[in-house]
Amino acid sequence: MATPDTSVDRGWKVLLFNDEVTPLDVVIFGLQRAAGLSVEVAEMVTLEAHRDGEAVVKRGLTEEDAQVICGGLRKWTRIDGVCPGVRCEAQPDDP
């Protein structure tokens, strides 16, 4: 008899890392577009990453959704000749 899978899926999170190149207003705009954050939440995440070096953008995501948000962040924060787009990672969420 098969044992049902009782493991808890921790989900995935998106981490945003600070850089010294991308303007804050561009990061805030990118967070709104890619992650669907409000202006206020996008500002808080941006300032936390700026202050602490990294910040959680969203958690409780599927791996695919986390990857899509990261790709969107890179796309919406890329300015040719100015900045290559923010650095972010999709990671398994903390237990």
Image: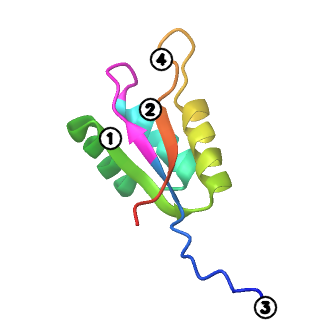
Give the vertical position of 10 relative to 69 (above or below).
below
Q: Name the residue under label 3.
A: 1
Q: Secondary structure beneath disc 2?
A: helix
The residue located at (47%, 61%) in the rendering is 59
Task: State the extent of the magenta-drawn residues as a range.
Answer: 15-23
Distance of mark 2 from mark 1, alpha carbons?
Answer: 16 Å
Determine which of the numbered discs, if any, sits on residue 26 in the image.
2
Q: Mark 4 points at which residue?
A: 83
Q: Which of marks 2 and 4 is in front?
A: 4
Q: Name the residue under label 1.
A: 54
Q: Position of residue 12 (x, y in %)?
A: 53, 58
Q: Do the residues labelled 4 and 3 touch (CB within 8 Å)?
A: no
Q: Earlier in the sequence, mark 1 or mark 3?
A: 3
Q: Which of marks 1 and 4 is nearer the N terminus?
A: 1
Q: Callout 2: 10 Å neighbours few (<14), some, many (20+)?
A: some
Q: Position of residue 58 (x, y in %)?
A: 46, 57
- Which colouring convention does the figure follow? rainbow
